[in-house]
Image (cartoon, grey):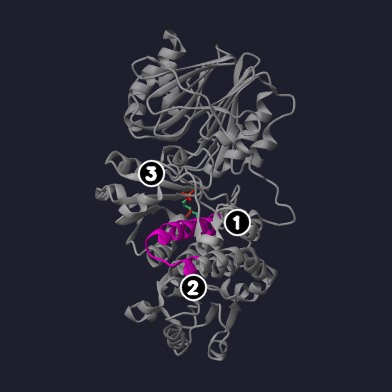
């Protein structure tokens, strides 16, 4: 789960590579490194910790026209400078940066050890450099092919050779790889974002392919050594906006961007058709009449995207009356998923690079299923591999904890539900109601954000607890799950979500003055029930914080703290109730002095199994 980038061309390679790494830091931030050819030798600079540590180590008088770079999320071997990439062969004739996992590295390492090689790191990747150097007398291309033929596992690999200062070789198996073609310069990376701002011309590499790059040319070959011709794609990728503006953290900035990003999700109104009470999403590659054939919808995703999917289930079942299943993508492949022609699959992902989601999509497609993507990152692997889909247009999300992508995913799932629902079940007037509620969301979100700092009071309480329960019923239950994930992720406080109805079936035993509960309680059929659950918690000395959209004396009396969001249709209420939950996590983490934008052990995108 790492980011790799390579450059060769007319520019100074170091700033290009550093810029690439900044764009790729979402893939891991345990350590980073750069390898260049400098004065006819390979020079490697690497450092553990954030990219800024590497930046400090780079001296101004270094310059090169070729280099490879890496940002790491540790899998094999601890977070140390030695384990940072690039890794070098024994005689420093070749260096390698690697994204993926070499499953058979121990055996390869053992064999190389018997031949006299000694290793400097605990990584699986170092063996690739050693193996390649072993065969280097046959020339770089053959050496790489021979090394690759012995590897089992996943890789996106870049090779740099001391004695070939105009050559980078790249190879892919199971980890993404893309070439960027500039004028008298070439880029290669795990994600086109790495060369955003330099070139928009890209060629995507497939599994089993190797690319031989020089400043003015590239050649793709497959395992049979046959040359592959592939079209150059024009990508509309913008560099991530790395400015925090007036905000202390990206997380807070992104929470505050939600009114604007939801407005973009509804196409600034253009994706909604108020007169017809429906939505219009192009890119699905489906005709309206295809909607009649859908007997089941199956949403696959991970983490926050999966909780967006759970809300999608609630909204879609309500508006379309089609049964919806939501699956944790990492579980799906293992259970041999049932795929049939009347099931429509949606894969939801912010990054479009989540390995588990991609693997599940591959399996479903392999069985003949139709998968549509709901994706944020333009040109990502998921966006390219699905049979159609919708971009959520949240803009670049840098904080590891996902916020605005979540609200945009839920918004898009609502538009889909409306579009399908209007052909099958719901009336024009109900459709119009939903459209007008969607249009009013940004303003309601703004209203909540104006009172953001009020959440400091709840955060001040929460910061001193070891564990917190988040409780909700019906549509509020997935909100509780997402709220619990957010708190865990950024504050490191243990948090658990339950449906409030399930409290008496076990979790109530946890309630005491040491275990606070946050209830998500909105107006609707179950509001009375939730109030009685709150009473049960209070009766056992549990502190109670409530996020609600109705002001009720009973609720005010019961809650230690109450935060009100504006009223809305029940189906859209999660898009409002989640905002105070996000803010609560942020302020709690801030008070605890956590690394809010890059929490320990995590990466923005999980690109390994
Ligand atoms: O990029 P994706 O949406 O596919 O990522 C899925 C999860 O890894 C992601 O939502 C994760 O749970 C977030 N860090 C949660 O804030």
Few, some or many C-alpha atoms within 10 Å of disc 3 (few <14, some 14-19, many ≥20)? Answer: few
Mark 3 and mark 1 lie on one chain; the one further toward the N terminus is 1
Q: What element carries label 2?
A: helix
Horizontal and vertical percent for residue 161?
53, 16
Q: Is residue 422 magenta?
A: yes
Vertical relation: 15 (above or below) 601? above
| Residue 570, disc | 2
From the viewer's perspective, is residue 598 above or below residue 111?
Answer: below
Q: What's the CA distance linking mark 1 and mark 2?
A: 21 Å
In depth, the one of 47 and 477 nearer the eye is 477
Badge 3 element: loop
Q: Which sits earlier in the primary sequence, circle 3 or circle 2?
A: 2
The percent position of residue 155, horizontal first and vertical second, equals 42, 31
Q: Label 1's element?
A: helix
Q: Mark 2 and mark 1 in contact (Cβ < 8 Å)? A: no
Q: Position of residue 518 (x, y in %)?
A: 51, 76
Question: Secondary structure of the magenta portion, mostly?
Answer: helix
- What's the distance in space between the residues labelled 3 and 1, CA to CA? 38 Å
Task: Looking at the image, tell me whether mark 1 or mark 2 is earlier in sequence order.
Answer: 1
Mark 1 highlights which residue?
269
Highlighted range, magenta: 405-431
For image coordinates 54% across by 57% down, the residue present is 273
Q: In which quarter of the image is residue 149?
A: top left
Seen in the picture, residue 216 relative to 201 is either above or below; the reply is above
Query: Which residue is identified by label 3?
Result: 609
């Amino acid at each position: 789960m790492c980011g790799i980038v390579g450059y060769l061309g007319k520019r100074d390679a170091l700033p290009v590579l550093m810029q690439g790494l900044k764009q790729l830091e979402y893939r891991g931030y345990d350590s980073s490194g750069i390898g260049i050819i400098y004065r006819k030798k390979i020079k490697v600079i690497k450092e553990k910790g954030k990219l800024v540590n590497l930046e400090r180590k780079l001296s101004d008088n270094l310059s090169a026209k070729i280099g490879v770079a890496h940002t790491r999320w540790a899998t094999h071997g601890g977070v140390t400078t030695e384990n940072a990439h690039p890794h070098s062969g024994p005689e420093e004739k070749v260096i390698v940066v690697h994204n993926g996992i070499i499953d058979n590295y121990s055996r390869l390492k053992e064999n190389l050890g018997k031949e006299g090689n000694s290793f400097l790191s605990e990584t699986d990747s170092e063996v690739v450099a050693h193996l390649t150097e072993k065969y280097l007398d046959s020339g770089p291309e053959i050496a790489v092919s021979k090394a690759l033929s012995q590897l089992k596992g996943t890789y996106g690999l870049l090779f740099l050779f001391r004695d070939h200062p105009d050559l980078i070789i790249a190879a892919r198996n199971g980890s993404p790889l893309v070439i960027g073609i500039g004028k008298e310069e070439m880029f290669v990376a795990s994600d086109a974002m790495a060369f955003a701002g330099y070139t928009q011309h890209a060629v995507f590499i497939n599994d089993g392919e190797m690319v031989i790059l020089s400043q003015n040319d590239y050649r793709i070959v497959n395992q049979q050594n046959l040359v592959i011709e592939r079209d150059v794609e024009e990508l509309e990728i913008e560099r991530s906006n790395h400015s925090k503006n007036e905000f202390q953290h990206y997380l807070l900035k992104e929470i505050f961007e939600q009114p604007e990003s939801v407005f973009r999700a509804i196409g600034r109104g253009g994706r909604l058709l108020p007169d017809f009470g429906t939505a219009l999403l192009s890119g699905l590659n489906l005709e309206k009449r295809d909607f009649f054939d859908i007997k089941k919808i199956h949403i696959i995703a991970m983490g926050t995207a999966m909780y967006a999917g759970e809300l999608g289930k609630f909204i879609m079942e309500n508006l379309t009356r089609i049964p919806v299943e939501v699956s944790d993508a990492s579980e799906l492949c293992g259970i041999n998923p049932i795929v049939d022609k009347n099931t429509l699959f949606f894969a939801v992902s912010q990054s479009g690079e989540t390995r588990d989601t991609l693997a599940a999509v591959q399996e479903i497609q392999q069985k003949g299923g139709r998968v549509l993507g709901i994706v944020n990152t333009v040109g990502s692997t998921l966006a390219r591999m699905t049979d159609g889909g919708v971009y959520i247009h949240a803009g670049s999300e840098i904080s590891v904890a996902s916020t605005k992508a979540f609200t945009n995913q839920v918004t898009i799932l609502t538009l889909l539900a409306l579009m399908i629902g209007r052909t099958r079940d719901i009336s024009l007037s109900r459709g119009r109601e939903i459209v007008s509620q969607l249009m009013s969301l940004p303003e309601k979100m703004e209203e909540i954000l104006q009172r953001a700092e009020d959440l400091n009071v709840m955060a001040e309480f929460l910061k001193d607890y070891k564990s917190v329960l988040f409780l909700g019923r019906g549509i509020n239950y997935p909100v509780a799950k997402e709220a619990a994930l957010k708190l865990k992720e950024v504050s490191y406080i243990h948090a658990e979500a339950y449906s409030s109805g399930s409290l008496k079936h076990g979790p109530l035993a946890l309630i005491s003055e040491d275990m606070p509960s946050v209830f998500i309680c909105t107006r609707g059929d179950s509001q009375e029930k939730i109030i009685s659950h709150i009473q049960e918690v209070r009766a056992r000395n549990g502190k109670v914080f409530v996020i609600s959209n109705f002001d009720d004396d009973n609720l005010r009396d019961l809650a230690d703290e109450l935060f009100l969001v504006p009223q809305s249709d029940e189906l859209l209420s999660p898009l409002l109730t989640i905002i105070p939950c996000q803010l609560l996590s942020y302020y709690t983490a801030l008070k605890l002095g956590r690394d809010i934008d890059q929490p320990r052990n995590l990466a923005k995108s999980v690109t390994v199994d």
